[in-house]
Image: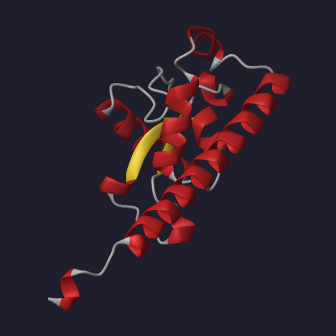
Amino acid sequence: MKKKNSALARELASQQNWFCHYCTLPMTDSSVKSKNLDSAVTTEHLIPRSKQGSNAPPNLKAACKLCNNLRKCSSHTDFKIVVTTLLLSPRMEEQWHNLDSQQRKELNQEIQSSLKQLQLKRSQEQQEQQNILGMRPQTVSGL
Ligand SMILES: [Zn+2]
């Protein structure tokens, strides 16, 4: 079973030229000695299995171990936005796959709070949208 998973991860990785779906940094083969590195390739379900995500190719991507661990149950689109934004910093890009445990902890906190802000912003926008629609004068219906 394990062997099958890593074969699948490798197949997905080669389709992405061995770049992580989220951080777009190079990944390493998880079947060799790099297994425990943050850059090791993993199979990622865009929609998690726990949310009825399928095991079919459109729902599968190769992602590095770090991204896979950091994403947890957040939406894959939100996570990608947050990671892409963080990696605009060249220093962050340099450190991404070489974090010590303290840095990883801080990064995790930063990501979780950014994800929350993103969700908050989205719900505020929805609320504003609803307010605007609610304020629309109903002139047309009387004609
Ligand atoms: Zn990654």
Q: Nearer the viewer, residue 39 or 48?
A: 48
The one of 106 and 48 positioned closer to us in this rendering? 106
The quadrant in which residue 13 appears is: top left
Give the side of residue 125 with respect to residue 117, left or right.
Answer: left
Q: Is residue 89 left or right of residue 140?
A: right
69 shown above or below 49: above
Q: How is the image coloured?
A: secondary structure
Residue 82's quadrant in the figure? top right
Identified at 33% across, 76% down, the residue is 137
Q: Position of residue 120 (x, y in %)?
A: 62, 54
Q: Residue furthest bottom?
A: 142
x and y, in percent, of residue 27 in the image: 49, 24
Q: Position of residue 23 (x, y in %)?
A: 50, 28
Q: How many marks?
A: 0
- Give the residue drawn at x 29%, y 81%: 138
Q: Hey, which quadrant is residue 35 in on the image?
A: top right
| Quadrant containing the C terminus in the rendered view | bottom left
Residue located at (62% from left, 9% from top): 91
Residue at point 77%, 38% (across, down): 109
Front position in the image: 124 or 45: 124
Asked whether residue 42 appears in the rendered view, the answer is: no
Seen in the picture, residue 98 relative to 46 is either above or below; the reply is above
